[in-house]
Amino acid sequence: MARCTDDPIHNGPMNQSPDNQPHLKRVLGRFDLVLLFVVAVFNLNVVPSIAANGGVTVWLWLISLLLFFWPQGIAVIELAHRYPGEGGVYLWAKEVFGDFHGFLSGWCYWTNNMLYVPTVMLYFVGVSVFAMGPGHTALADNKTFAMLASVALLGLLTVLNIVGLGVGKWLNNAGAIGTFVAAAVLIGLGVTVWLRFGTTVTAADFRVPADPRFVLNSFGVICFGLVGLELASVMGDEIKDPQKTLPPAVAWGGVISGALYIGATLTLLLAIGKNDISVLQGIVQAVSHMASRVGVAWIITPFAVMLSMSIAGIGSAWMGGSARIPFVAGLDSYMPSWLGRVHPKYATPYAALIVQAIVSLVLIVINFYASGGVQEAFQTMLSLAVVLQLVPFLYVFAALLRFAIRRDVEGGRYGRGTLIFAGACGFLTTALGIGLAFFPAKQITSVWKYEAKMFGFTAFFLVLAAFFFFVYGRLKPDAAAAAAVAKA
């Protein structure tokens, strides 16, 4: 966006409305959004933890695509049409259900990324060592190297997002391209191995196991993996012509992501089997195994580079998008007002981005130095992120039901029947996904410790949200009033 010098309301790269509320630059087009959806929705790093539960997860993917993902697309298009602007799930819940529900929705959406971003960093370290050659794979277990690599990536993503989506979006786009290439190689090798050597996978592998308790957790992770369509609406003020751009971008991004998820899951099961899948390095593990079988072992290093690029794009997309939540909450005075500051040169919510980076850094340190087994720590943090991430979608789907029940369909994009179907299916599926996340995955060795962490951290974040809204949100106006009286 060119700098405007002939309008007193526009001062430098940051646009401001007459009420002095900061506005952000519109730099995201349709192609950018499709790539953003792919890189945000299709996360290869969650596929191994899902595929490790066997072929039955393919049916869970199909169920989730029908009952969660499709309703999510309807909800995003409907709510973005009714309430355009910066904030996404925060803005929608606030407009439909009130201030506290809006804050809680945005808070859960933001804090889940405090847990998720460190898992992305950990996954990045596990994959990137393969890009350095087979002789360096042992570095993944070196805590010093893992810490330095994670911090370096976190710092890079923070800087790029502060410089602005006009620059940071190129990392998102590069991540989407890396995702496409990595998925194409993975699935292509799977098809080649199947055609040349056949498969040991049978119909029995797709049946529900006699003891399905370990599979239950994966349903919540699948729903978590399908979240991301709302991310562009969180950046609503930065989309070019959002009313025309968003619907086709949602459709294309959703179809591509769903197909890639199912293809990647099947390929992992074909290549290495559910009992040997590593939740951190399963993708590279599968490619390495299949490439060696077909005589193209040279592909492992460039594949690891592409996958590392994809993971970096995932981290950038979620870090940049979720930081808009405390930015808006800071403007609404439910959190410190300085979180609503935008950079004077780059017009980005730099304060919120820096805070998010600091908290993620702390969690990275805890993850590397205060946890037990790496895979168990990864799975626990992922399950916690699932719970917090899905809470805002209870509000999203409940909003559709509210519109339908009150027959408030005028001005929307969909009819009453579509709103009821999407709202009911989405709400019930989301609630089920949250509940099943409390069931331990097979990587968990101590059930009571897992449940204590799940309930304890969930309660902690919810109580902290109530504190900021009911205590901090009331103290600030009182302090402002006292300052005004003293000044008078």
Image (cartoon, rainbow, N blue to C red):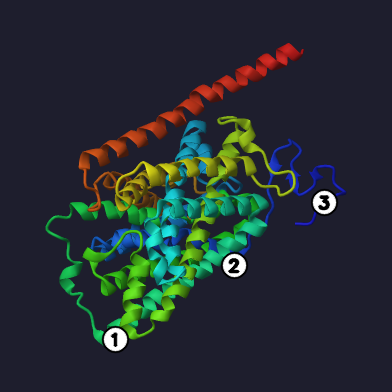
**Along the line of sight, which residue is nearer the eye, 301 or 250?**
301
Q: Is residue 479 left or right of residue 431?
A: right
Q: Are marks 3 and 2 in contact (CB under 8 Å)?
A: no
Q: Position of residue 181 (x, y in %)?
A: 47, 74
Q: Is residue 240 visible?
A: no
Secondary structure of the residue carrying tag 2 is: helix
Element at badge 3? loop
x, y percent for residue 8? 84, 42
Quadrant including the C terminus: top right
How much space separates mark 1 and mark 3, taking CA atoms? 60 Å
Q: Is residue 416 left or right of residue 165?
A: left
In the rendered picture of this protein, how many numbered marks are placed on residues? 3
Residue 268, by quadrant, is bottom left
Q: Earlier in the sequence, mark 3 or mark 2?
A: 3
Residue shown at 21% from the left, 53% from the top: 214
The amino acid type found where label 1 is placed reads Leu
Q: Residue furthest bottom?
A: 196
Other-residue count near label 3 (Cα within 10 Å), few / some / many at <14 / 14–19 / ≥20: some
- Residue flagged by tag 2: what amino acid is it? Phe
**Which residue occupies 36% across, 54% down?**
223
Instruction: Work out how far the residue at label 3 is from the one at label 2, CA to CA, in angstroms.
Output: 26 Å
Residue on which the image places disc 1: 195
The quarter in which the N terminus is drawn is bottom right
Mark 1 vs mark 2, foreground winner is 1
The residue that label 2 is drawn on is 31
The answer to whether 57 appears left or right of 83 in the picture is: left
Q: Label 2 near label 1: C-beta < 8 Å?
A: no
Of residues 441 and 219, the one nearer the viewer is 441
Instruction: Identify the residue position indicated by label 3 in the image.
Output: 4
Q: Position of residue 206 (x, y in %)?
A: 20, 68
Q: Earlier in the sequence, mark 1 or mark 3?
A: 3
